[in-house]
Image: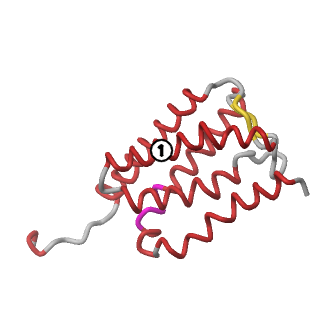
Amino acid sequence: MRKSNSYIILMTILPWLTIPFIGVKTIKRFLPGALFMCLYTIFEGNVAERRKWWWFFYNVKPNVLGEMPLILGPFFVGSLWILKFTFSNFKKYVILNVMIDSFFTYVLLNWFKRIGYASLIRINKLQLSLLFLVKLLLMYSFQYFYENYLTLKKSSPASK
């Protein structure tokens, strides 16, 4: 097994080891937002593959996106953690997301290229940062809409 394969397997599995610390209530509350972002990111990955925005040298299987380990590992679990700690405070949410997304864009991408996992092709790091900005707004908006309009709220004693 190549050394990069070990990194990719660890990158996928390690975030899941933190799930017991999130809490069942938090998972139930934020699962829709995290799943929505995973589905959106899979769609985005298909578009990116066709337009050659980036390239993943590592494929799990033929016809499976190379970024699937990222989506199912740190992206999904990280979305739950970010929503848990920042959802009620939009400013805090944006700041934390920009910090994490910048670390990914300007540090991890260089490492991914060095280990032969992924590389940007037709977009630059600033454009990738803007894509992350769109995603952070979409995830917050979806979760806000879900909590305020799609879930049945328990009636308060004042409304009786």
Membership of 91 in magenta stretch: no
- Residue 6 in percent (x, y) is at 81, 58
Outermost right residue? 1
- Residue 35 in percent (x, y) is at 53, 56
Q: Is residue 46 above or below residue 33?
A: above
Image quadrant in which you'd find residue 5: bottom right
Left of 63 or right of it: where is 135? left
Q: Dividing the image into 4 quarters, which one contains the N terminus?
A: bottom right
Left of 160 or right of it: where is 69? right
Is most of the magenta stretch helix, strand or loop? helix
Q: Residues within 10 Å of mark 1 (few under 14, many from 20)?
A: few
- Secondary structure at numbered mark 1: helix
Q: Is residue 129 above or below residue 84?
A: above
Residue placed under numbered mark 1 in the picture: 99
Amino acid at pointer 1: Met
- Residue 87 in percent (x, y) is at 35, 56
- Of residues 155 and 36, which is closer to you in this image? 36
Q: Identify which residue is drawn at 53% across, 57% down.
A: 78
Q: Identify which residue is drawn at 61% across, 41% down.
A: 43
Image quadrant in which you'd find residue 40: top right
- Residue 12 in percent (x, y) is at 69, 59
Left of 31 or right of it: where is 88? left
Q: Dividing the image into 4 quarters, which one contains the C terminus?
A: bottom left
Left of 85 or right of it: where is 38? right
Type of colouring: secondary structure
Question: Which contiguous range is marked in magenta?
Answer: 29-33
Q: Identify which residue is drawn at 60% across, 36% down.
A: 106
- Of residues 68 and 92, which is closer to you in this image? 92
